Image (spheres, rainbow, N blue to C red):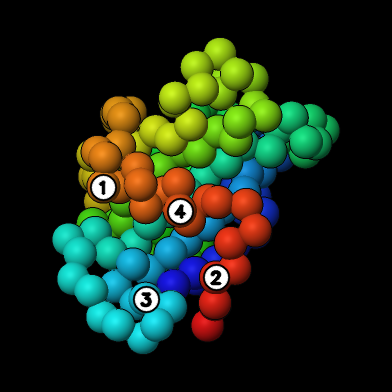
């Protein structure tokens, strides 16, 4: 079930300079609640998919999702009051993005963090396993209608 789908702006650091601030598209799904009312068990039932919007509006973004991954994850957990241990983080690059054009099979990147208190540290990127990749492709499919709460 889709919980949130829209722009997400994060403040950076550095007081008034807001270094590291930016904007992305954020989608948060609760996989334990299907659109048909079924209940499914997952170790990490929340799925956060982040997409750069820098190409669409360069004046809004100062940083990319990859460049600020840990800071964004920390902010999302705080802003949406989520349990960091229950979230699977994914970066998504649409086929039209420069990163996808260079390597079309790398549209999705799974991101794992080490959490220290409330801060996401040391992001580690890898290719999602096949079952998760299939789910991601289905969720991102253009024209898909998903019920939200």
Residue farthest top in this picture: 102
Q: Are marks 4 and 1 in contact (CB under 8 Å)?
A: no
Image position, residue 4 (x, y; %): 55, 66
N-terminal of the pair, mark 4 or mark 2, is: 4
Point out which mark residue 24 bears.
none
User: How far apart in space, not on screen, are marks 3 and 4 (Cα)?
Assistant: 14 Å
| Residue beneath disc 1 | 131
- Residue sitting at 53 percent across and 51 percent down? 140
Asked whether residue 119 is in view, the answer is: no
Image position, residue 119 (x, y; %): 34, 46
Q: Are marks 3 and 4 in contact (CB under 8 Å)?
A: no
User: How far apart in space, not on screen, are marks 4 and 2 (Cα)?
Assistant: 11 Å
Depth check, front residue: 45 or 14 = 45
Q: Are marks 3 and 1 in contact (CB under 8 Å)?
A: no
Image position, residue 125 (x, y; %): 33, 28
| Residue beneath disc 4 | 138
| Residue beneath disc 2 | 146
Q: Going by the image, does 118 lie left or right of 18?
A: left
Within 10 Å of disc 2 (Cα), the crowding (few <14, some 14-19, many 20+) is: few
Image position, residue 84 (x, y; %): 30, 57
Depth check, front residue: 106 or 138 = 138
User: How far apart in space, not on screen, are marks 1 and 2 (Cα)?
Assistant: 20 Å
User: How far apart in space, not on screen, are marks 2 and 3 (Cα)?
Assistant: 10 Å
At mark 2, the secondary structure is: loop
N-terminal of the pair, mark 2 or mark 3, is: 3
Within 10 Å of disc 1 (Cα), the crowding (few <14, some 14-19, many 20+) is: few
Q: Going by the image, does 40 lie left or right of 141?
A: left
User: How far apart in space, not on screen, are marks 3 and 1 (Cα)?
Assistant: 16 Å
N-terminal of the pair, mark 4 or mark 1, is: 1
| Residue beneath disc 3 | 34
């Amino acid at each position: 079930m889709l919980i949130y789908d829209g722009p997400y702006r994060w403040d950076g650091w550095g007081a008034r300079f807001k270094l590291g601030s930016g904007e992305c598209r954020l989608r948060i799904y609760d996989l334990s609640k299907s659109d048909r009312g079924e209940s499914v068990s997952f170790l990490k039932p929340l799925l956060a998919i982040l997409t750069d919007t820098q190409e669409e509006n360069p004046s809004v973004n100062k940083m990319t999702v990859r460049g600020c991954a840990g800071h964004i994850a920390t902010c999302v957990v705080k802003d949406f009051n989520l349990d960091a241990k229950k979230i699977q983080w994914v970066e998504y690059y649409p086929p039209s993005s420069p990163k996808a054009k260079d390597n079309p099979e790398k549209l999705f990147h799974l991101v794992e963090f080490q959490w220290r208190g409330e801060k996401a540290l040391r992001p580690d990127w890898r290719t999602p396993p096949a079952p998760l990749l299939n789910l991601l492709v289905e969720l991102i499919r253009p024209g898909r209608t998903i019920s939200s709460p």
